[in-house]
Image (cartoon, rainbow, N blue to C red):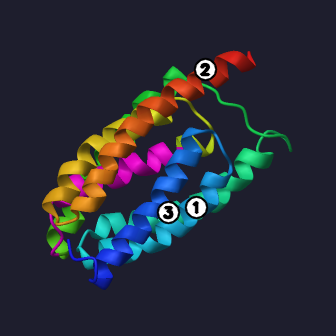
Amino acid sequence: MDFSDPAFQLEIAANVAAAASILLAGRNSVHGWWMSIIAGLLFAAVFLQARLYGQVALQGFFIVVGALGWWQWLRGNQGAPLPITRLRAAAWPGLVLLVVAGTWGYGWMLSRHTDGQAPYVDAGILLLSMVGQLMMMRRKLECWWVWLLVNTLAVPLYYTGGLQLTALLYVGYWINAIVALLHWRRLMLAAR
């Protein structure tokens, strides 16, 4: 790790913004959304340099959903703040099918048309992250289970891709997801 390297400095800035965003989201704070927009912009540049093209696309998604999530959390319940709720059990089979099919399709495309590393893992993280972010945007408790899976897959991908700082931070995100899951569950039960 060369602290004078501009690429490493960019990775540090991206991780600081992402950590702030994730910690704020875990605390159920609307301010996490604008931090996610900043983190998305910075990480798009980091992942482009690392040839993780699925992750670059994911950052574009995070930027758009960051703006939508900010609005949803403030006004998404007919003008009132959106409460934390559970995902209907009937929604899970469709989500699993979407993630599996999307991972296969996007992974195949990345493997055939880019020089990206680990295209299917990259694609799986992309699809799971999209589902997790959309669930978070709607304040679904189960989003944190999805983030646990994303972080479990991302740590080895980023580490082997030369992004050791990002891999280390994702270990922290994994721990944050557990803490956030418990915190959101308490908030949801207290609101009943």
In the rendered view, does 164 fall on the left or right side of 186? left
In the rendered view, does 72 fall on the left or right side of 55? right
Q: Which residue is mark 2?
A: 186
Please tell me whether residue 14 is drawn above or below residue 139 in the rendered image: below
Say whether residue 126 is magenta.
Answer: yes
User: Spatial distance from mark 2 to mark 3, Cα to Cα?
Assistant: 26 Å
The majority secondary structure of the magenta stretch comes to helix
- The answer to the question of whether label 3 and label 1 lie on touching residues, with beta carbons closer than 8 A, is yes
Please tell me whether residue 135 is drawn above or below residue 155 in the rendered image: above
Q: Over which residues does the magenta segment extend?
A: 115-134
Judging depth in this view, the residue of 92 and 162 nearest the camera is 162
Neighbor class of circle 3 (other Cα within 10 Å; few <14, some 14-19, many 20+) is many
Q: Of the residues shown, which amino acid type is indicated by label 1?
A: Met
Query: Residue 140: horizontal and vertical position, in percent?
Result: 58, 33
In the rendered view, does 5 fall on the left or right side of 127? left
Q: Secondary structure at mark 2?
A: helix
Q: Which residue is mark 1?
A: 35
Q: Of the residues shown, which amino acid type is indicated by label 3?
A: Ala
In the rendered view, does 77 fall on the left or right side of 137? right
Q: Secondary structure at mark 1?
A: helix
- Residue 46: image tag: none
Say whether residue 183 is magenta.
Answer: no
Q: Which residue is mark 3?
A: 17
